[in-house]
Amino acid sequence: MTLTIAQLGQPVLRRPADPVAAEAIATESFQRLVGEMFQTLSQSGGAGLAAPQVFISLRLFLAVIDAPEDDAGPEVEVFINPRIVSASPEQESDWEGCLSFPELSVLVPRHRSVRMEYTDLDGAAQALDLEGFAARVVQHEYDHLDGVLTIDRAASTRDIVKASELEAVRRARAGGAEQDR
């Protein structure tokens, strides 16, 4: 079963999420929720999905942490009660989409690398050092747990564009002559 994705304006997207109780992780209902989130993420073609995006205010998200080397699909990790425990001082800005407002792309500065501590789906404590795209994805999903959206991180409203116009914006910013249509 796929879940409904909350869209921009839904109050659940702006509310800090509640921690997941340790004893809840092994329950059938929690495991089913995670399975449904996997299915929803897979069908949406996204790189991550946070529980608040499916109307569940819990500190839980799924994120692509490694690109596939074959046709197996991307490696997706389950992060329960995650914490960013360190982040590189270096940041990079890049365009991000969001399943909760797919019609927009936002230029967002993010740390180049982060260290995440979290609980996995088996209830075990884990830590991961992530960089590049994976670091960007987990920071994006982590923001959802605090009620923060990419549009909140844009340096300017000029860094929020309609997704279908992103290539034109990129060309214009790269100095390409862009004609008005």
Image (spheres, rainbow, N blue to C red):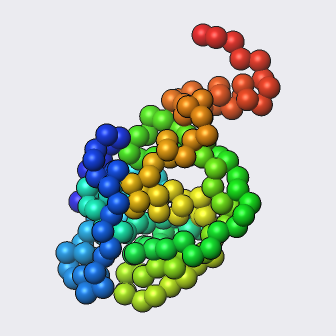
Report whether 42 appears left or right of 167: left
Residue 105, image x, y percentages: 53, 38
- Classify 50 as above or below 19: above
Q: Quadrant of the C terminus?
A: top right
Q: Quadrant of residue 177?
A: top right
Q: Residue at x 36, y 69 (%)?
A: 59
Q: Nearer the viewer, residue 71 or 121?
A: 121
Can the viewer see residue 44? Answer: yes
Residue 21 x, y percent position in the rendering: 28, 81
Q: Residue at x 60, y 29 (%)?
A: 158
Image coordinates for residue 109, horizontal then vertical, percent: 64, 50
Quick check: can you spot residue 51?
A: no
Q: Position of residue 170 (x, y in %)?
A: 69, 32
Question: Where 49 falls versus 181 (above or below)?
Answer: below
Q: Which is nearer the eye, 54 or 47?
A: 54
Q: Residue furthest right?
A: 175
